[in-house]
Image (cartoon, rainbow, N blue to C red):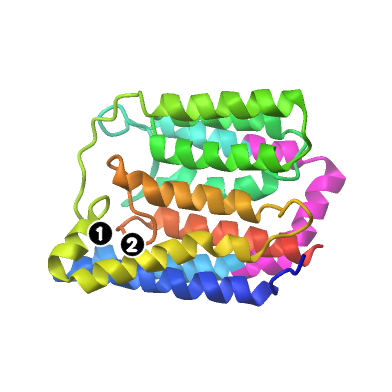
Amino acid sequence: MVVASRPSVIVFFGTASLIAVLAGCWTAAASGVATAIWARQVMAWLVGLGLAVAITRFGPWVQHRLADSGAGPAALLAVIMLLALGFAEPGLQAVHRWIVIGPVRINVAAIALPVTLVLLHRARSAPVAMVAIMLLLIAQPDASQASGFGVAAVIMLATGKRSRFALAQAVLLAMLGALAWCRPDPLASVAEVEGILSLAGQRAPAVAIVAAVALALAALAPLRLAVGSDGGAGPVLAGYMVATALAPAIGHFPVPLVGMSMSPVIGFWLGIGALAAQQRDQ
């Protein structure tokens, strides 16, 4: 299998994601959204780019250190604890998806899950971690992240070693992902976050089309790094990104990259960086 070069996926995703982010910022600005809100999206994109480049360079070393020290399960446990930390916050209408740091509300799942999926692709503790993460996403509740994680996990299990256990776990995770949509979600849609594409269509249909196409290309970017005979974590990450990009068409969830939510911007970049680091380590 021909593997795309490491810089190409960062350039490809970076270009598509920047177009999506800028289209969302233009729509928000044209709709009277405060400059401080849409400017943070550009800042998040720049921070994400920097983190992705750093992960690409140092990621293989970190992964080897984790493996050598046996700290891999501890890293996954830290992610699970961060997701659980959202329940320490009051939440919004009994929804606990965020950790609040000053004026910034961080969606931990949107930031942590992309890179976690790349790590889980090699982790022996993946089966337990995947179920624990899915249960937390259902409890939050967050059907968008649960669907993205569930789709990615099923792809991971389907492309991995075939066994009855893997099949049973794939069925379990698919059922849990469907269950997440049955949990009540009282949050109303915010135009510049969940309804940004509709808002763009009202302002300039061409911008809405550009934003949607750019988002689709960015979500499919991980497929440019198909590593190994099973495709590596590329299809897994792409499954997550595509699922979370489609979720706003069904429910009130942030549109990744285009909507005014910084967490998916940084999260997507972290996943791309981890994937590029994995390819570099081959």
Disc 2 crowd, CA 10 A, few/some/many (<14, 14-19, 20+): many
- Nearest the eye: 228 or 256: 228
Given the image, on which type of amino acid does mark 2 rest? Val
**Image position, residue 189 (x, y; %):** 21, 44
Q: Is residue 41 visible?
A: no
Q: Quadrant of the N terminus?
A: bottom right
User: In the rendered view, would you say 24 is above or below 15?
Assistant: above
Image disc number at residue 197 = 1
- Nearest the eye: 176 or 75: 176
- Residue that carries the numbered disc 2 in the rendered image: 258
Q: Which residues are magenta?
A: 53-77
Residue at (69% x, 71% y) in the render: 4
**Image position, residue 223 (x, y; %):** 61, 61
Residue at (25% x, 29% y) in the render: 93
Real-space CA distance between mark 1 and mark 2, rounded to the nearest whole angstrom: 8 Å
Q: Is residue 77 left or right of residue 242?
A: right
**Image position, residue 221 (x, y; %):** 55, 64
